[in-house]
């Protein structure tokens, strides 16, 4: 992929966490040197969950993925992505352990991320959306509560309850560095990700909705490729955008980018067995929306997105966004102002 950094670069903020942000950051760092990743902090499954429970640290996993995406050195990226597959460290990535060690040494997760950023020589910065130690909670219509992102992630919501109720416990406050990044941004891009365990929790942090409402930046949402069974089943592109805005407290989105390409039949059949289907779209309803909707062939070939040194991350999904296609579409969007005909 060729470097396309413009002389008059834009300040870009990416909101999300995990694989969605990782994929997006890899492409966006070729467009601007001024990029900030704001990262969800409710992960409590897998390696991050073990480290949180056993050592009392903040979850390093999503932060690590963003750091790796923005790192300049391939060897250092591989090191931070390396995951142990046996022994007492089985399941842990080196990067997670490294961030945990830095936090324990300094007593500050923010300082740990800053130190890791320097060692990785990243392009831009990675900022936790909050520095509070919080857990995600889902509450059903009859008052039953489910605690923990990893438990909620595998839930199937009761359609009779309407749109799901989730909240953070205890309440979290926005990291001042995150608030500043949102304030100074030219473009804010909401990465693809699970609505209720990745993006929603981030938007629930006290101070985030207000910052998004007040920012002068144009806000772009990149819609997911497939629905999440039992959670976003039946939701089309417009419904995904509506849920983002529900958590954000009002209409904040200027542009929605969505995929129009169809996955190969064999690959889609594998997904269909698990009730995972492409996110549908209605062009007529999207044209009536308050935001500009931009469709494109954003589906990547399977072989293009394996991460050699993190097989867990590589195997989580076979259907991924095309880094090149997204980069070209976003490049055109942010460096061709006249393309935006609908603004808030």
Image (tube, grey):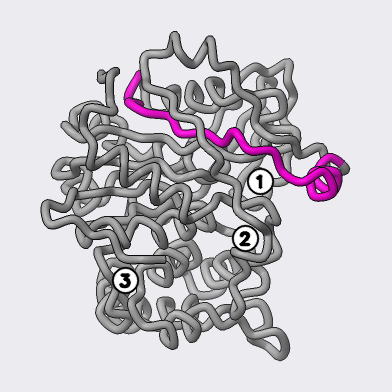
* Relative side of 326 to 19, left or right: left
Judge the density around disc 3: few (<14), some (14-19), many (≥20) Cα neighbours within 10 Å.
many
Residue topped by disc 2: 45
Question: Which comes before the other along the chain, label 2 or label 3?
Answer: 2
Q: Quadrant of residue 108?
A: bottom left
* Residue 171 visible in the current orientation: no
Q: Give, as a single range, the part of the protein colored magenta.
A: 251-272
Residue 113, numbered label? 3
* Residue 135 visible in the current orientation: yes
Asked if the residue at tag 2 contacts the one at tag 1, i.e. Cβ–Cβ closer than 8 Å, the answer is yes
Q: Quadrant of residue 316?
A: bottom right
**Is residue 258 a member of the stretch shown in magenta?**
yes
Q: How many marks?
A: 3
**Is residue 245 a member of the stretch shown in magenta?**
no
Asked if the residue at tag 3 contacts the one at tag 1, i.e. Cβ–Cβ closer than 8 Å, the answer is no
Horizontal and vertical percent position of residue 116: 32, 78
Question: Which comes before the other along the chain, label 1 or label 3?
Answer: 3
For the residues labelled 1 and 2, the Cα–Cα distance comes to 10 Å
Residue topped by disc 1: 153
């Amino acid at each position: 992929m060729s470097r396309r950094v413009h002389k008059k670069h834009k300040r870009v903020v990416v909101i999300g966490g995990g694989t969605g942000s990782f994929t997006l950051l890899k492409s966006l760092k070729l467009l601007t040197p001024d990029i900030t990743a704001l990262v969800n902090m409710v992960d409590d499954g897998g390696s991050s969950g073990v480290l949180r429970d056993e050592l009392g640290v903040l979850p390093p996993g999503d932060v690590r993925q963003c750091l790796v995406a923005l790192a300049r050195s391939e060897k250092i990226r591989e090191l931070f992505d390396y995951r142990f597959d046996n022994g007492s460290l089985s399941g842990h990535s080196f990067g997670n352990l490294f961030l945990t060690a830095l936090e324990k040494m300094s007593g500050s997760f923010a300082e740990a991320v800053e130190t890791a950023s320097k060692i990785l020589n990243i392009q831009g910065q990675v900022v936790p959306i909050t520095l509070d130690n919080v857990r995600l909670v889902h509450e059903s219509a009859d008052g039953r509560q489910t605690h923990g992102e990893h438990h909620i992630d595998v839930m199937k919501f009761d359609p009779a309850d309407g749109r799901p109720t989730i909240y953070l416990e205890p309440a979290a406050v926005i990291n001042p560095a995150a608030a500043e990044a949102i304030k100074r941004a030219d473009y804010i891009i909401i990465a693809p990700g699970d609505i209720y365990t990745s993006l929603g929790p981030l938007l629930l942090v006290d101070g985030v909705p207000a910052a998004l409402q007040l920012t002068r930046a144009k806000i772009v949402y990149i819609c997911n490729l497939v629905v999440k069974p039992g959670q976003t089943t039946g939701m089309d592109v417009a419904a995904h955008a509506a849920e983002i805005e529900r958590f954000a407290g009002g209409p904040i989105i200027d542009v929605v980018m969505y995929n129009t390409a169809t996955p190969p039949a064999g690959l889609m059949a594998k997904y269909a067995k698990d009730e995972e289907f492409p996110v549908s779209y209605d062009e007529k309803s999207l044209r009536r929306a308050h935001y500009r909707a931009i469709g494109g062939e954003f589906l990547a070939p399977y072989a293009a997105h394996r991460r050699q040194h993190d097989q867990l991350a590589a195997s989580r999904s076979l259907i991924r966004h095309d880094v090149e296609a997204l980069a070209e579409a976003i490049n055109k969007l942010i460096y061709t102002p006249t393309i935006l005909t609908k603004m808030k």
